[in-house]
Image (cartoon, helix red, strand yellow):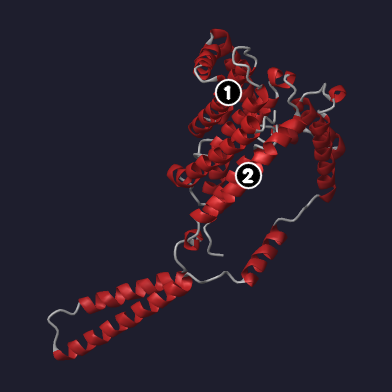
Amino acid sequence: MELDPIPILMAMVIFSNIGGTATPVGDPPNVIIASNPAVIQSGINFANFTMHMTLGILLVSVQTCCQLRYMFRDTNKLRVGEPRDITELRHQITIWKRSAQSMLNISKDEQIVHERLQKKVTKLERDLKEKLKDSKKVVIPSDTFETTLAEMNQKYKIRDVPLLIKATIAISFVIILFFLHVIPELNRVSLGWTALLGALLLLILADRENLEPILHRVEWSTLLFFAALFVMMEALSKLGLISFIGNITENLILRVDENGRLAVALMLMLWVSGVTSAFVDNIPLTTMMVRIVTSLGSNPNLNLPMAPLIWALSFGACLGGNGTLIGASANVVCAGVAEQHGYKITFVQFFKIGFPLMIGHLITASIYLLLCHVLWHWH
């Protein structure tokens, strides 16, 4: 369809990071936050986490749509270079010009040929100007879209309908259990174990004789990375680094008047975690910051509610990942797959689109948090 897939891929990955912010299981930072024992003890569960975050995420989605629409208001940015006929016309003009310029010290007969060559160049340049004008108005015909869609439907068929039904049952089971966490009697199984129960249910329903190929596809290296990360954070906590950063943050907040402490704490958590996670992977950042947030929320000297600080950290850590190509795992994966298909997404290319969007995310989240938790006290 002569469209550049890179802006589409970037929009897709940006919205996947935004959508993942809405629930405790949508993005790795949220999983880390929601699994923290202090956060669970403060009464935060799947239902109230989703309720508080989803409203803010809807506002961020609207802001992102408007900002992307403004950034790509020139639709030529979405095209793959120039249309083929315009490229060929430019090539012809170059050849005719070169032929005309080659006639130096020309005789009378050659003068006639030179004039005709010049007329040809002028006509081609006029045609080029018209084509360039028309190309800005070109709309991809609907039949091109329909043909492309039909080809994709043929190529990417659902090949195992029974397995699709079983997978739908398993994921529905998991989502229902997530929301049942709000009932204290049923809140005895963590979010992690709930997800694992869903995986076990799907394995039982799939009834595969050989599970080895399935187990080979598990990202064991990623799981080991998470395990090692938690060990490292526990070691840093024992060595006093987490307490040291928490004390600095606490002293900054204590300098503010008591009426403005919550607003300052929210902005501090949101912007520090947001800007930092754009340049540092948001998973280790969240692992450290959640300790600091729970420390601030349980500090009697500050007298701050923990829940708003948790929402601010979640907004910052997840949305900050949209700032750069290395800010979130989804960005890196998308860039890798795109490069395999011949479309390289560079750091600067992503930064030009992602960073302004991330600043917009944080401003929108700031307004939402200040209105809900400072003005209306919705804790």
Q: Quadrant of the C terminus?
A: top right
Q: Is residue 91 above or below residue 157?
A: below
Q: Tell me: residue 268, above or below residue 50.
A: above
Residue 366 in the image: x percent, y percent? 57, 36
Residue 25 visible to an observer of this rendering: no
Which residue, given by chain and number where applicable, does mark 2 sit on?
59
Q: Position of residue 126 (x, y in %)?
A: 36, 79
Location of residue 14 in the rendering, given as x and y in whole percent from the top left corner? 58, 44
Q: Locate residue 87 relative to residue 218 in the image: left or right.
A: left
Quadrant holding the N terminus: bottom right
Choose the circle earlier in sequence order: 2 or 1: 2
Q: x, y percentage for residue 318?
A: 59, 34
Q: Residue at x 35, y 75 (%)?
A: 92
Q: Residues within 10 Å of mark 1 (few under 14, many from 20)?
A: few
- Mark nearest the camera among 2 and 1 is 1
Identify the residue shown where x is 22% and y is 84%.
114
Q: Residue at x 58, y 28 (%)?
A: 283
Mark linked to residue 259: 1
The amino acid pointed to by label 2 is: Leu
Compared across the picture, whether 205 is left or right of 279 comes to: right
Secondary structure at badge 1 equals: helix
Determine if residue 257 is in view. Answer: yes
**Toward the viewer: 72 or 370?**
370
The quadrant holding residue 16 is top right
